[in-house]
Amino acid sequence: MSTDTQTYSIHNQRDAIGEYADIMGYDIVATYEDPGRSGLNIEGRPGLQRLLMDVESGQADFETVVVYDVSRWGRFQNIDESASYEYRCQRAGVRIEFCAEQFANDGTIGSDVLKAIKRSMAAELSRMLSIKVFLGQRRVVKMGFCGGGLAGYGLRRLLVDEAGEPKFILKRRQYKGLASDRVVLVPGPPEEIAVVRWIFSQFVKGKSRIEIVRALNKRGVLTEMGRTWTSNTVHTVLNNERYIGNIVWNRKSEKLHGKRARNPASAWVRAEKSCEPILDRKVFLRARAVADARAPLSNERMLADLSKLLAERGRLSEHIINAAPGCVSVSTYQVRFGSLYAVYKLVGFEPPNNGWFDINDQLHRRRRKIIEDLVASIGLAGGLARYDPETKLVSVNDEFTVAVWIARCHPERFGCPHWAYSQERLPEADISVLIRMNPDNVSVRDYLIGPTYQVQRRTTMLTANNHAGIDAFLFQSMDPLVELARRVRLEGPALS
């Protein structure tokens, strides 16, 4: 079940399943629950994942699984997915029974037809609820209220009652308690407003986002999340129309727990003059014009500029590319094409140190595999983890974020290895993980796991033996993160 206010509460299901078990003469020996979870996908169902794992591994000491009804097995949008999980249990010799349905799940034609209809109805109900929720949120935004999410640097969320009377300022992770209450945006502290205006003035004067980031971090200014500034956070400020009084909602959507996608501008919901502006509209539009003038080039144009540079210089390197006025930065090429080596091959340049690029590609694949294993392990431990390739962050239980980086081993001439990483590349994560490779750059030596603010301020270079402030965060596996994300399995006679 997804909320405590539902008819399908865990307690109601437990009582119904208990009564059914008494009538059928069953002894309840295990319980698998997914409280506060949506049944739209398997990734968000740690209880169902544990059930399948126990059944297929032979660890299950039961013959029958009792579910309240078909919808509690899951509202999977593809009904074949729901059927596949039931089939996996049946193949392992475990039956599935629904105690609140009017048919016996006995494999007859009649029961199979009814079950298929029930699965379709469960999926359709989720789609209809999704549409109703969207229309409701759209109406709220059109009325000038906040549609959710963070207020933004320099702004605050004010809770008001149904009459529009202010109550109090909401803190981070604090939400309204009454359905009739609404949230409006108001100006934040004067010092934050001054920083917002300074960012826009610097950008209009020609400063790049990176230059603004360095200046803010040098001054010790922190974001609304209490973290250091990055190019992405400055970009967010420069594109936030809330500073001129407009609320724009539905830029991105994740319908029915699917893949998060960017929506076209025609699908955005806009409410102008909905809150008090803290920035002059002319300055905002000027910054937008400057950003448009710096818009990314097409792949063909970027490769053409690089080919021209290769013809002029006869070779390519990171220093040559970054210093060339007609080319974008090396990091832009890497983001657009995956790696610098891939770009070199596209323009026909064969670098003298191919091995270095080969190792980089191997490390990139190894990092992705470790992240996939981490997400899977957290799921098996009862938690929920998702990796966002856009932000390069792993979100864990919607409570904290993890950034995972990998560092190659650099042997020095005296045989002492070291590992380097760039602090500017670290995203805004609560926890940072640095994977240190062995000298062969194939096997993992250990993992540096610690709070980002401590990892960033300690050092940018690691050696085999560091001071206690670093070595205290070194581990041989990612198990500490898995344990941090572990959720205790609830006991009791219920299944959902």
Image: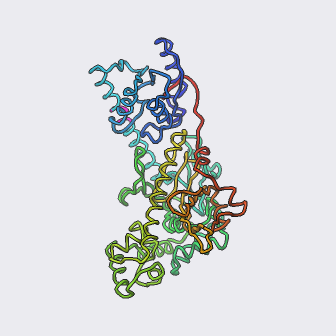
Q: Main secondary structure of the magenta part?
A: helix
Q: What colour scheme was applied to this rendering of the protein?
A: rainbow
- Is 121 one of the magenta-colored residues? yes
Q: Is residue 41 left or right of residue 400?
A: left
Residue 372, given in percent of the width and then of the height, sits at 47, 50
Residue 198, given in percent of the width and then of the height, sits at 59, 74
Q: Is residue 479 above or below residue 224?
A: above
Residue reaching furthest to the right: 468
Q: Is residue 385 above or below residue 327?
A: above
The residue lying toward the viewer, choosing from 453 and 9, is 453
The residue located at (44%, 58%) in the rendering is 365
Residue reaching furthest to the front: 414
Q: Which residues are magenta?
A: 120-125
Q: Is residue 74 above or below residue 457?
A: above
Residue 230, given in percent of the width and then of the height, sits at 56, 67
Residue reaching furthest to the left: 109
Q: Is residue 479 left or right of residue 140?
A: right
The residue located at (52%, 31%) in the rendering is 33
- Is 268 one of the magenta-colored residues? no
The residue lying toward the viewer, choosing from 427 and 266, is 427
Q: Quadrant of residue 229?
A: bottom right
Q: Quadrant of residue 424?
A: bottom right
